[in-house]
Amino acid sequence: MNTNPLEILEESSKRISPTLVEYEIGSEVEIILYHLIAKLRPEYQNFVVISFHDAYLALKRYLENILSHEEIHKTFSNIHLISVNPVLEIEENSPDDIIKSTHHDIIVGRILEIISKIQGETLFLVLGLDFYGIRVGKEELIDIFPALVSAIGRKKNNNVIMTLNVKVFPQGVVEIVNSFAFNVAHLGIEVHNRDLKRYITLIRTIFLEYNLKKWYYKLFGKELIFNSANPED
């Protein structure tokens, strides 16, 4: 029987937060995120998306190429969108709040002010921190990540999902960042005999028996098929 790593990540994220999804370009992180959020969304009263540098718009545009309007609307309707340094998102996504600053302390302070008014269990999706780190600097990324974790993870029943393109930063920066996440999954790609294979490794979850296990996955339209990298599993 094949175990679904997204279900493991989902359950772990509900018990302890935050969750960091590390990814490489080509790993189709967008469809992984869609399936993870679709599983989690019904569990929470509120859904807050914090988008740096139009990252939410990029996610939506990708999903529009493979999913129906109804499927996207079901998962991403009634969200509270906080856009940090947006350009195109202002017109296309009508953010609920806009923050324009490059200073991590100002950004986190504004986010904390905004979310303090939101009552009830909340699912957070943080997108584009890699864009922020590239444009502003990896030192600011190292500062903003734990500050964000502290700000939005204060309430016990909040679930925080964060993403980071790990190939654009030195390994030392990646290790510092993921040390602040309780759950860590890595999405990557390998080449086998000229064939591209995508994989997910659960680096850290509360389910110790699955940590460091690896699955290959294929996309069939909008569906994901997982197979363990170890035939004995």
Image (cartoon, rainbow, N blue to C red):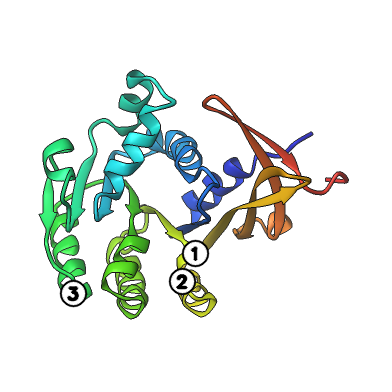
Query: Toward which corner of the image does residue 113 lie, by quadrant?
Result: bottom left
Q: Amino acid at mark 1?
A: Val
Q: Are marks 1 and 2 in contact (CB under 8 Å)?
A: yes
123 to the left or right of 115: right
Q: Earlier in the sequence, mark 3 or mark 1?
A: 3
Q: Amino acid at mark 2?
A: Phe
Residue 119 in percent (x, y) is at 20, 48
> Residues under labels 1 and 2: Cα distance?
6 Å
Residue 228 vs 164, above or below: the answer is above
Is residue 17 in view?
A: no
Q: Which residue is mark 2?
A: 169
Image mark for residue 103: 3
Q: Which residue is mark 1?
A: 166
Crowd band around label 1 with a 10 angstrom C-alpha radius: few (<14), some (14–19), many (20+): many
113 to the left or right of 228: left
Crowd band around label 3 with a 10 angstrom C-alpha radius: few (<14), some (14–19), many (20+): few
Q: Nearer the viewer, mark 3 or mark 1?
A: 1
Query: Toward which corner of the image does residue 108 lie, by quadrant?
Result: bottom left
